[in-house]
Amino acid sequence: MNQISSLRICLSILFLFIINGCKEEPVVNVESFDGFNISFDNKGEGQTTIILIHGWANNRTIWDAQTTHFSEKYHVIAADLPGFGKSGNNRKMWTMESYGKDIAAIIEKLELSKVVLAGFSLGAPVAIETAIKAREQVVGVVLVDNLQDVEMKFAPPMIQYMDSMMMDMVNKPTMEKLVQGGFFKHNIDSSYHRVLKLWKDVPQIGWSESLIELLKWQNEQSVNSIKSVEAPIIAINSDMQPTKVDVFRKYAPTFKAKIVKDVGHVIMWDNEKEFNRLLEESIQEFIQN
């Protein structure tokens, strides 16, 4: 090999090294509307972005399997809401509207233009509030096992009872409480230990407040918020309780529900394959319309 050829090879290697070394790391933190840090996973590429929003008393790691799976085809963000995971936790407002502003801040910061929101449990109303605030960017909303009856109301004693019961569960967890509460039906031992890991040495700042705000949102805002969403809405629900599709369609006429049988509340843990299939199906419905 002559000197010129050797030099060309060396320069090519150096060029590739420089290019790879200059690639920007993906943004994984933004500042929310009230100055608190919002932390999230940011993986994959594609014109469509899926934002995964966790439920109460958990964090973005509940979506680990979906983040890995869908980032092979899409841009995927799994966010920690304030008070959970690695996001800030000393805010004063724990409302669903505030959480919606948090997710909207991610959309704005990353300049996203084609977004599918998937919200589990508490994340369902957060997805709805986000869709209102980022209506031009959101092309579809997936609600995961919540809002089966959007007209249900919780009396004040019931709100107090649910707050007490749920805080007792996170502070004194047992496998029996979680199974009887319908959180999961399969892989019980591994799911239980996964939950214990979520709750181990966690401050719980804002947990009671956000749970109460969730129930207040259901009572006072859910119907009007749903009517304000312009993007199509699809639910992926368990069969533990009936989904009142006709009631929901009074406020979102194109709403549809996809029911997964024989699973607990955390559908994506109990039947990952079927959940992923239905989420992919829903994403395709959104982006092809």
Image (spheres, grey):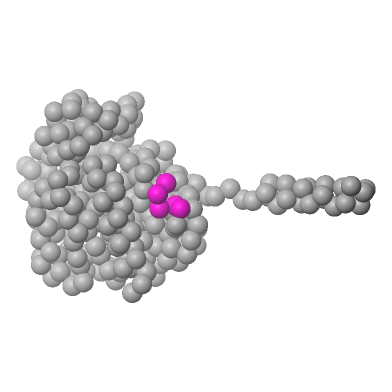
Which residue is rendered at x = 44% and y = 57% of the image? 74
Which image quadrant for residue 209?
top left
- Up the image or down, 147 lies above or below 113; here it is above
SS majority, magenta = helix
- Up the image or down, 239 lies above or below 195; here it is below
| Residue located farthest toward the front when viewing the structure as drawn | 1
Residue 148 in percent (x, y) is at 14, 56
Task: Kindly tell me whether residue 224 is visible in this rendering.
Answer: no
Reply yes or no: does residue 247 show up in magenta.
Answer: no
Q: Nearer the viewer, residue 201 or 140?
A: 140
Tell whether 202 sits left or right of 263.
right
Which residue is rendered at x = 19% and y = 59% of the image? 258
Which residue is rendered at x = 31% and y = 52% of the image? 276
Reply yes or no: does residue 70 show up in magenta.
Answer: yes
Residue 199 in percent (x, y) is at 30, 30
Point out the stretch of residues depicted in magenta: 68-72
| Quadrant location of the C terminus in the rendered image | bottom left
Tell whether 103 sits left or right of 97.
right
| Residue located farthest toward the right when viewing the structure as drawn | 3
Residue 275 in percent (x, y) is at 27, 51
Task: Kindly tell me whether residue 153 is visible in this rendering.
Answer: yes
